Every structure is written in structure tokens, then in C-alpha cells.
Amino acid sequence: MPENQYTFDNPVDRYPSIEPPAEHVDEPGTEKDLTPPADHGETSYVGSGRLTGRKALVTGGDSGIGAAAAIAFAREGADVAIVYLPEEEEDAQRIAGLIREAGRTAVTIAGDLAERSFTDEVISRTVSELGGIDILVNNAGKQVAVESLTDITDEQFDKTMKTNVYAMFWLTRAALPHLPAGSSIINTTSIQAYQPSETLVDYATTKAAINTFTKGLAQQLAPKGIRVNAVAPGPIWTPLQPSGGQPAEALPEFGKQTPLGRAGQPAELAPAYVFLASSESSYVIGETLSVTGGMPTP
């Protein structure tokens, strides 16, 4: 494990190549379900004041990529609100504790982003409890592997679309009146937008939609000084994977198809989100930043 995000080493073995057990856990999945555990940068991420005084909202901030981004934002000086499902309360409180340990304000908001009324509440609470918002990370997602299109139920398709696409639209629309010039919107897309797996047709479809939404909205908001970008992760070890995101039998080989030969860890995504949130990326607009372990994207 690296000492911090600046540690110079070989990316092939910066983290070990994991071999998770071929076991399925119930949705939505939590950190205690992960064998081996994931690294969110809890002991390694070192901040340098790149987001001092900023106010961030991160959906899916209880675990995985969202948790890594939330920890990094706080250590860079931002106050952070995180959104998560009620079943993920234990994980959310752990991340909130790390945000507070960094000396920043943490706001925890539990609910289902597939419900439009809840997304309005998320923005209003964030603005009220943080005193504003200038970073919005639309990261929460639903991913369920299904062998055949005929086995994707209307309910699954609808919930995947609402969680991954509608919630992004609802939250962004509600946040816009509160976002000052200099704000950053960061959407989480995926390698699946470019290399869709045969078992993730509905999920991959949403990720392609997120790419297009990002690029279109970036053009609209650039003149207002609001930057919109996306991050496209490759195979990253999070609770999404064993809770239906991958077929159980595929888990022991998860991530080994990458040129680096291993799955990524959430901590390896955090610097991408910090870069896109900070003023260092002031001329980066409508970009999809791929963090895929070498899996090619356009």
C-alpha cells in the first residue's frame, strides 16, 4: 500500500491484485461485505489546501469512489455533504467521522435518489447546512448484472435509469440556482460507456447517457463560469461489485483484464475528483477523465 498519493512506485503492484470470493451479497452492499476491504485513502490521502473553503455534495459518499472523494475533499479543506441509502448508515457515519477529523463540517443525508422529492431535499439541506454549494459530485449508481435482456425487469430498468440518470438531472437542476461562478459539477460515468459488458446492458446505457449529458451541459454552463466534467472509472473494488454488479463467479478475476492486471482501489480515483473540483482545472470543461488501469477509451 502506498504511504500517500504521492508515493513513487510501480502502478502494477501499488496495490495487490485481489481475488474476492465468488459470493453474492444483498444490495446495496456495505463495506463489511467486502473481502478484501477497499482502500478509500483513510490512512494515505494527504491534503494541501486545494479546496479550502469549498462546499461539496457527494452522492454515494458512504463507500467506494464517493467515500474516497469525500475524504479527499475534506482533507483539501472542503466541507462535505454525503448522500446514501438508509441501509448504508453505518458506512456513512464512518466517512462523516473522517471528514470531521479533518476539521471540516460533515452533513449526512439518507434517502433514495430515485425519488424526485428527495433530490430537492438533498440540495436544500446541503445549501442550508453547509451555507452553500460549489462542488456537486453525481456519483451514486445502481449496477446489477443480468445474463439476458429478457431477464431485465421493468422495475430494474426503471430503477437503474432513475438512480443513474434521472437523479443526476434532478440534482443538477436543483443545484444550479445555488452554484456560483467557479463551481464544478463532476459526474461519474464508466468504462462501460465505451466497452459495455454483455451482462450490464442497462447500466452501460446509463453511463453513455451520463457522458452525453456532461458534454452538452458543459457547453451550456461554461459561459456562466460553471465547469462540468466526468470521471470514467474502470474496474474499481467497491460494494457495488459483490452486491450484484458482477456475477458471483466472475469476482475472483475482477479487474485482472486490465493492462495493469489488477482492480483499482477507490483511493486511486480521489485525485481525479480533486483535480476536476479545484481551480487547477479551470480550462478543463466537458472532459471525461478515464481512470481505467489502461483499458482504452476514446
Image (spheres, helix red, strand yellow):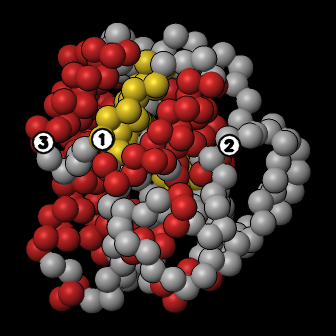
Query: Which of the marked residues, 3 or 2, is nearer the chain's N terminus?
Result: 2
Q: What distance separates the C-alpha of mark 3 from that of mark 2?
A: 32 Å
- Numbered tag placed on residue 116 in the rendering: 3
Q: Residues within 10 Å of mark 1 (few under 14, many from 20)?
A: some
The three-letter code of the residue at mark 1 reads Ala
In this figure, which residue is indicated by the disc labeled 1?
110
Residue toward you, 93 or 163: 93
Q: Please state if 62 lies on the left or on the right of 140 as rendered.
A: right
The residue pinned by badge 2 equals: 41
Mark 2 neighbour density, 10 Å: few (under 14) some (14–19) many (20 or more): many
Res 43 quadrant in image: top right
The local crowd at label 3, few if under 14, some if 14 to 19, many if 20 or more residues have their Cα within 10 Å, is some
Q: Secondary structure at mark 3?
A: helix
Looking at the rendered structure, the kind of residue marked 2 is: Gly
Where residue 232 appears, x then y in whole percent? 49, 53
x, y percent for residue 173: 19, 30
The image shows residue 44, relative to residue 146, as above or below, that is: above
Reply above or below: 289 against 240: above
